[in-house]
Image (cartoon, rainbow, N blue to C red):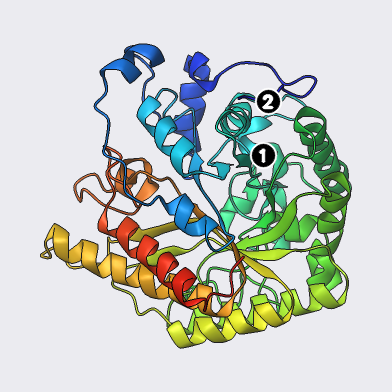
Amino acid sequence: MTERPKPGFPKWHPTHWRPSRRDLLWTAAAGAVLASCRGASGPTTAEAAATQPQAAEPAVTLREACRALGIRHGAARDHFIDPEDPMLDRLMARECDVVTPENGGKWGVFQHTEGNYDWRRFDAAVELARSIGATPNWHTIIWQHMGMPPYMKLPAGRQAELGISESAYFSPDGSLSAENVWPRFTGVVEAVRQRYGDVFYRIDVANEVFFWETVESHPKEQDRYGFRRGMWWVAAGGAEKGPEWLDPFFHHVHKAFPKAKLVLNEFGIEIDEGWQQRKRAYLLDWLTGAVKRGVPIHGIGLQSHLIGGKPYDSAGMRKFLRAVDKLGLSVHLTEMDVDETRLPRSWSRAEKDRAMAQLARQYLADMLDTARVEELCWWHLRSDLNFIAREHPDLGAHPSPYDEESRPLPLYTAVVETLREKARTGKARSG
């Protein structure tokens, strides 16, 4: 049964909403941040549900396999990209303990112009979670280089002065500064708290604040602690405060949402390449310091965008995870999928699926053996909705555990078998 909404939270179902022309134009303009919009025309939800073929349910759901280890299972969903999808809603009802708004919780979506809130996409994810008995996540408050509206970027005129070549941090309409970064941050946190209350399971307080290293960026685009010299880092005084520049944001979110698991969400640490190994070290240094300083961080969010065809660093990841575990921090797999775009084009669909399933099996086994895993959240349950499949329609990619008809793929089988094996042997550190 759907819970009664908080005061001010409209009682409506996400399928009642149709995107306006303005919404469509904004999505197209967002490009790198938001996925392409698919029109919401066609039969009503009730008609579609009555005529859609029912996919055969697997004998064991991913959620059941996760629950046996004390892990919450879930997925991302965006009701703007797919506002009506009763088959997907049934799948999520069967599989999800948590629901992440893929884009609805991003600042650039719900407050694209200062002081003007558009809650529709955030509302839809929270309402879906409530309607299926799951808990919503908030992804994300601080995003260091993307997902922010123009006014939450640095003034374009400061780029030369700051000596930062990455233009994503700047905008002609940017007005972010040391004077307004804190009141804007606390204002958004308070607006979300007033609308939804302390309902979130996990909050990604900061997303992708550490560097993505390239030949051009290293060491110019990051500081000595590995942070991107991005708009938040500049406005919050990263150059002067060092690794402590993030601390106040975590303290404030914890006061506003005392029940939520607060995490730092990052990507790009799984591969056996120098820059990812260095990023691992920078990340661990910050986590160690944050725990010593009493920062209210409960875990590390690992996006887990795995890359088939790249050398996975199992030994390095196990070492990193053991160190995280010693800090008393849990692990949240927040955006899991498997990228097949680097696998040989000549491989058959079955060959690709086997390679991707094996990678996921090894990665998850490393997690369960050496870390306290509390959450496994996919970046969409269905492969056709994942950004990899959308960006490479010619591949017929399978980045997620189910196909477009909600049928389980080899990736699903590999993950379920790994989870059940760990539950059977009692070797998992999860839960």
Residue 330 placement (x, y as % from top left): 66, 68
- Residue 216's place in the image compared with 277, above or below, is above
Crowding around mark 1 (Cα neighbors within 10 Å: few <14, some 14 to 19, many 20+) is many
- Residue 17's place in the image compared with 79, above or below, is above
Residue corresponding to mark 2: 3
Residue 112 visible in the snapshot: no
* Residue 295 picture quarter: bottom right
Between disc 2 and disc 1, the foreground one is: 2
Image side of residue 123 versus residue 7, left or right: left
Q: Secondary structure at mark 1?
A: helix
- Rounded to the nearest angstrom, the CA distance separating label 2 from label 1 is 26 Å
Amino acid carrying label 2: it is Glu
The first of marks 2 and 1 along the sequence is: 2
Q: Which image quarter holds the C terminus?
A: bottom right
Q: Secondary structure at mark 2?
A: loop
Image side of residue 420 versus residue 342, left or right: right
Which of the labelled discs sits on residue 107, or is there none? 1
Q: Residue at x 48, y 69 (%)?
A: 423
Q: Which image quarter holds the N terminus?
A: top right
Q: Find out whether the residues at labels 2 and 1 contact each other: C-beta distance under 8 Å.
A: no
- Residue 3's place in the image compared with 105, above or below, is above
Q: Residue at x 45, y 24 (%)?
A: 83
Residue 236 placement (x, y as % from top left): 82, 58
Residue 281 placement (x, y as % from top left): 62, 83
Image side of residue 70 versus residue 419, left or right: right
* Residue 197 picture quarter: top right
Q: Residue at x 81, y 74 (%)?
A: 291
- Residue 53's place in the image compared with 242, above or below, is above
